Image (cartoon, rainbow, N blue to C red):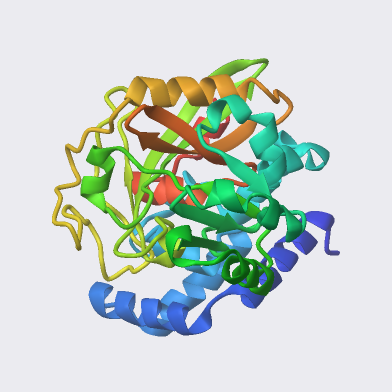
């Protein structure tokens, strides 16, 4: 007889079948097969077996390098299905809009935002603000419910008329305009074309805030720093604010990245400016909505100090664990 737990496992595997980018997975397994001298079909069989056993997604198996890890090492990881269940428990659905909706987030955490923003609830607001906006130079257009940098566009208002701006907004369904954030000169050394942000993961236990992870995301020639758009990520030592491990990428052929591939900056040993202030702003922000217990804060560093870009109720355990090179499940339950 199939119990509810077994049904869930089948549902998760079915979901992974649906969302997997199969050409990439085949390419990655083929690469691993050659690298590890293991038969392609043996690796794929292990992917499916472990997905049923642990809830790991097919791509996570490759990203976490489970093909070279034993059962005990694999069980140290929190998998996609497990982190989903964990975040369902820690972050009630009815409160998630405080961080998932960027407009609500900007209002709720206004003291930590550090930039002007405009709610584009209709095109007439742009006409009313035309004089004010003309002095802004670069601005950022977003969808308030967008994710992973897939709905962000940077435009220079010096090169656009208001009518041209309105057309861009309507075509892409943007409903939020933000002042462009100019990052600290040290952060620009890593990658000047993207806003390179720090992900700080907090856990709120009766308003006692514990930081369980800190990672920097760095762009590689594009306007965003997300790994899904070609960026890289590195673990940051929480005590020192210094990158202490080589970078990782969603391109598994690029492993142990010690030097930025575009700027040539050495990653290990790089010191993040305003580190204590970064931790402080996240701790204070995490106390504003205590019922959202587990959050991932994205922080930008300007010449004046850190500001919050956004917060995530479904922060990715993948980025956290990949950058550490090991499973970190135990830190969620300490």
Q: Is residue 57 visible?
A: yes
Residue 143 occupies quadrant: bottom right
Give left or right: position of 192 versus 83.
left
Q: Is residue 31 above or below residue 234?
A: below
Measured as percent of width and height from the top left, residue 206 is found at 67, 15
Q: Is residue 145 visible?
A: no
Measured as percent of width and height from the top left, residue 226 is found at 43, 57
Q: Quadrant of the N terminus?
A: bottom right
Measured as percent of width and height from the top left, residue 190 is found at 23, 49
Task: Give the residue drawn at x 65%, y 62%.
Answer: 174
| Along the viewing direction, whichever of 149 and 46 lies nearer the viewer | 149
Q: Is residue 60 above or below residue 319?
A: below
Task: Give the residue drawn at x 47%, y 48%.
Answer: 136
| Along the viewing direction, whichever of 215 and 184 lies nearer the viewer | 184
Give left or right: position of 121 versus 157.
right
Give left or right: position of 116 versus 292.
left
Q: Quadrant of the C terminus?
A: top right
| Along the viewing direction, whichever of 183 and 61 lies nearer the viewer | 183
Q: Is residue 295 above or below residue 153?
A: above
Task: Give the residue drawn at x 24%, y 43%.
Answer: 245
């Amino acid at each position: 007889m199939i119990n509810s737990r077994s049904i869930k496992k089948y549902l998760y595997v079915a979901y992974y079948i649906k969302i997997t980018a199969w050409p990439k997975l085949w390419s990655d397994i083929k690469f691993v097969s050659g690298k590890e001298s293991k038969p392609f079909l043996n690796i794929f069989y292990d992917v499916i077996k472990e997905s049923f056993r642990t809830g790991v997604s097919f791509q996570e198996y490759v990203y976490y390098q489970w093909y070279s890890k034993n059962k005990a090492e694999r069980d140290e990881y929190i998998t996609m299905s497990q982190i989903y269940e964990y975040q369902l428990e820690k972050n009630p659905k009815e409160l998630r809009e405080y961080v998932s909706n960027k407009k609500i987030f900007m209002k709720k955490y206004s003291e930590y935002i550090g930039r002007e923003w405009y709610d584009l609830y209709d095109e007439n607001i742009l006409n009313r603000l035309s004089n004010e906006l003309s002095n802004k130079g670069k601005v950022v257009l977003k969808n308030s419910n967008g994710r992973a940098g897939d709905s962000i566009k940077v435009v220079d208002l010096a090169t656009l008329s208001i009518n041209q701006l309105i057309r861009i907004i309507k075509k892409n369904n943007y409903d939020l305009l933000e002042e462009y954030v100019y990052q600290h000169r040290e952060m620009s050394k890593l990658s000047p074309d993207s806003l390179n942000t720090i992900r700080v993961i907090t856990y709120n236990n009766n308003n006692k805030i514990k930081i369980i992870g800190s990672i920097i995301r760095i762009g590689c020639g594009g306007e965003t720093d997300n790994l899904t758009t070609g960026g890289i990520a590195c673990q940051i030592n929480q005590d020192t604010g210094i990158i202490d491990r080589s970078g990782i990428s969603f391109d598994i052929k690029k492993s142990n990245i010690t030097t930025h591939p575009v700027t040539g900056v050495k990653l290990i040993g790089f010191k993040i400016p305003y580190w204590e202030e970064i931790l402080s702003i996240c701790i204070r922000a995490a106390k504003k909505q205590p019922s959202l217990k587990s959050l991932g804060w994205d922080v930008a560093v300007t010449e004046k100090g850190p500001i919050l870009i956004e917060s995530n109720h479904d922060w990715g355990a993948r980025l956290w664990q990949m950058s550490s090179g090991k499973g970190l499940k135990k830190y969620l339950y300490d």
